[in-house]
Amino acid sequence: MVGLPRYKHFIPLLSIVVNIVPRQIEMKEWWLKNTKHFPVILTEIHKMVLGDLTGQLPILLDTLLRLALEITEVSPINDDEVFDVIVGKLWSSPEASAIVVGIYNFAQLKNEKIIRTDPSRIVT
């Protein structure tokens, strides 16, 4: 690729456009489709935090939606309280637990591989 070094400072920007912008569009469309299922009107900040907490992973977004539908039976005092209930239930859900365990196991395997290849990197 002739001339690529001249444009190397654009590569991180291209990465953002290719990876982040489509995810933002997907999340915006997800919220448009699913906002009606939430028992309260969530602010853009609430939506942004929930997107960050779920990592925009479909399994956690589906769990979030299921939990929101369950919360309609509860009558919290205000929107922030509903948000807190949703976040608490999300983190205690089996789906979230499975993801945390998977990440932990992956990290342990990577750590063991690093130690096997370079024992001097053991951190105590």
Image: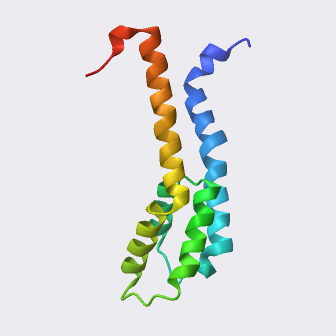
Q: Is residue 13 above or below residue 116?
A: below
Quadrant in the picture for the N terminus: top right
> For the point 42% across and 79% down, which residue is it?
82
> For the point 58% across and 54% down, which residue is it?
56
Q: Is residue 30 above or below residue 107?
A: below
Q: Is 67 in front, or is 25?
A: 67
Q: How is the image coloured?
A: rainbow
Q: Is 44 in front, or is 117?
A: 117
Residue 21 horizontal/vertical position (percent): 62, 49
Q: Is residue 76 above or below residue 107?
A: below
> For the point 37% across and 9% down, which residue is it?
119
Q: Residue furthest left?
A: 124
* Residue 91 falls in image quadrant: bottom left
> For the point 60% across and 62% down, which residue is it?
61
Q: Is 22 in front, or is 114?
A: 114
**Would residue 103 be found to the left or right of residue 37 on screen?**
left
Residue 93 horizontal/vertical position (percent): 50, 63
Q: Is residue 93 above or below residue 37?
A: above
Quadrant in the picture for the C terminus: top left
Residue 74 horizontal/vertical position (percent): 46, 88
